[in-house]
Amino acid sequence: QLQLQESGPGLVKPSETLSLTCTVSGGSISSSSYYWGWIRQPPGKGLEWIGSIYYSGSTYYNPSLKSRVTISVDTSKNQFSLKLSSVTAADTAVYYCARHLGVSPDYWGQGTLVTVSS
Amino acid sequence: NFMLTQPHSVSESPGKTVTISCTRSSGSIASNYVQWYQQRPGSAPTTVIYEDNQRPSGVPDRFSGSIDSSSNSASLTISGLKTEDEADYYCQSYDSSSVFGGGTKLTVL
């Protein structure tokens, strides 16, 4: 059974870089059928798509976040990662990793709360 | 980019049928698939409809999806409502990137 698990610091200081990793088990990140990506949800608010990546490294990003976002993949570890630079309090959210069909999530991790605060 | 607009909330009684709409602001609703996600309180979203009207395995056939080009909208219909259906529902579609609707809180009372 496919499982996705987010990991990384739960607290990040303003202006620093948020870094999260998603570890995939029960399936290969090198599958030709899927992309892998990130979505976030500020407390009490709706979902915002961040971006997705193919195992070859091809990426799609949300235009509103593109200048601050990098998504990368490590096929040897069956992991993919998110970096979001120059964070502010507005970046406080639950961050979900998810398997994607292109840019559409279809199977989600449980999510991890990241708070931006000094 | 375009927007997807959903009603903020809907409510209905157990056993009844409810429909949640999702209207695309620009571009044709039929040009890209629509997905629907259910999010229960404190949990991650799960897919209940993909590719406009397809149900993942394990999703009951009480859930159905459709699109209407005349209103440029998609709809999620849940029949035979159960209290366990109470959740937030999000539509999603895309062009060059992915867009979520604002979400609809379904109350089953």
Image (spheres, helix red, strand yellow):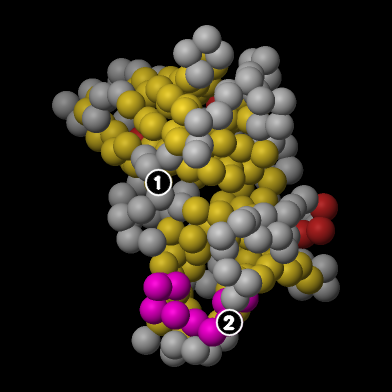
Q: Which residue position holds label 2? A: B79
Q: Nearer the viewer, residue A39 or A110?
A: A110
> Which kind of residue does numbered mark 1 sit on?
Gln
**Residue at screen point 58% across, 23% down:** A29
Host chain of mark 2: B
Q: Horizontal and vertical percent for residue A32?
A: 71, 26
Q: In the rendering, which numbered label is found on residue A41?
A: 1
> Which kind of residue does numbered mark 2 sit on?
Ser
Rendered-image quadrant of the C terminus of chain A:
top left
Compared across the picture, whether A8 is left or right of B9 comes to left
Relative to A39, is B72 above or below?
Answer: below
Residues at marks 1 and 2, CA–CA distance in whole angstroms: 28 Å
Let me know if residue B52 appears in the view.
Answer: yes
* Residue B50: quadrant of the picture: bottom right
Q: In the rendering, which numbered label is found on residue B55?
A: none
**Residue at screen point 58% across, 24% down:** A28
The residue positioned farthest toward the top in the image shown: A76
**Residue at screen point 37% across, 20% down:** A19
Please state the extent of the stretch shown in magenta in the rendering: B77-86
**Residue at screen point 50% across, 37% down:** A2
